Image (tube, coloured by chain):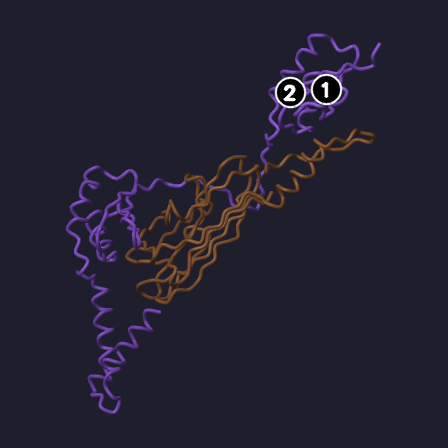
Chain colours: A purple, B brown
Amino acid sequence: MAAYQDVMCTKAAVNPDRLCDELIAVLGDCFVDLVIGGAEPGELHVILAADTPAELIELVSAVVSAHDAYAVDPAPPEPDTPQPQPVGDVLDIVFSLDAINIARLDADLRAALGQDFIGLSGGPGQQVRVHVRAGADAAVIADIAPLVAAHDPEQLTAAQQVAEEQAALVAALRAKPRDSWTDSDRDNALLWLFERLSSE
Amino acid sequence: MAWTSPKTWEAGELVTATLFNTHLRDNLNALKSPPSQQILRDNSGNYTTTSTSFVAIDSTNLKCTITTNGGDVLVWFVGSFSASVAGYDVGLDIRIDGTTRLGSDFTWGLAEDYELSTNARPITLGPVIVSGLDAGEHSFEIMWRTASGQTAQLRSDAGQVPAILVAREVS
């Protein structure tokens, strides 16, 4: 009489430790060993005690068949690592524009749409994305397309106008020899320096 | 090559080629080449945003997608940022699988520059560990925001520098 029973199965991929645990969970003390390998591709042998009941032997192939070699128990999260949190929804409305003054369009949309407007994003070769809160009223969303269509990239924001005037001022001062500066030129230079320093 | 939990060997156990291939060769191969993606993004110009909430910089081209074996993923990002006016702010964060933001407990995300220059300066986000992910496909996007009335810019141009995003499984 054989000391053990050998049940041959085939399985393309096996995690032996996991499969042993799964076999023990079903067969209990009747499970003796798992031997992987043989003449056939994916061949494995489940070694059982000689007195293993027939109804348990019949379960071996089902356990092997259900085995997932790549199943992984998720690692517990590290306590000091920040965990992801759900993000509030942002609705993106996409427009194609040939040219855009993003600061000006942002200012126009912010003034017209109020709190529902989050901002704009874009770049060369891309369409412009208008970001609004996902819960924004349909009436607010309907206002966006006409505002975008009316956008004139040549129109500057107040800040852009100031920056342009200051750039022109600096260019004029640079072009002028220092010993020919007037009192007005010196005042303008001081004012420009003050604006720069106070904005830092 | 997928990772397999290493077998606990028993004294006197028959060692087979299949076991060696599964637990040594395949696992060493998995450690040598873990799931990984690096993006050097050339957008042919600056990305810009005025958004006051976190939005994706580019959901198509600045997104790493890897299929993991389960566990932790290291993510990091480097980009050169500037502003149209000195002193503007930019915040950066990582969105996982298009739904969850890693730094959502923080107003400005995981990295911030609150004194952007009109000349581009590099900002590095991470490396940070995104922990406890299930086995399977996962995406990692870079998000950004600025303050109201401000415009932030990210360089991404072959004539200058790329925006760099990396994701690599590490456990």
Which residue in the rendered view is the most extreme toward the front? Answer: A39
- Mark 1 and mark 2: Cα distance apart in space: 9 Å
Residue shown at 45%/59% (left/top)? B123
Residue sitting nearer the eye, B74 or B160? B160
Quadrant containing the C terminus of chain B is top right
On the image, the x and y values in percent for residue B94 come to 45, 47
Position of residue B88 in the picture relative to residue B76 (left or right)? left
Amino acid type assigned to the residue bearing label 2 in the image: Val
Q: Are marks 1 and 2 on the same chain?
A: yes
Q: Is residue A102 above or below residue A72?
A: below
Position of residue A168 in the picture relative to residue B10 (left or right)? left
Q: Is residue A195 above or below residue A150?
A: below
Position of residue B31 in the picture relative to residue A199 (left or right)? right
Q: Residue A198's quadrant in the figure?
A: bottom left
Read off the residue under disc 1: A46
* Image mark 2: chain: A
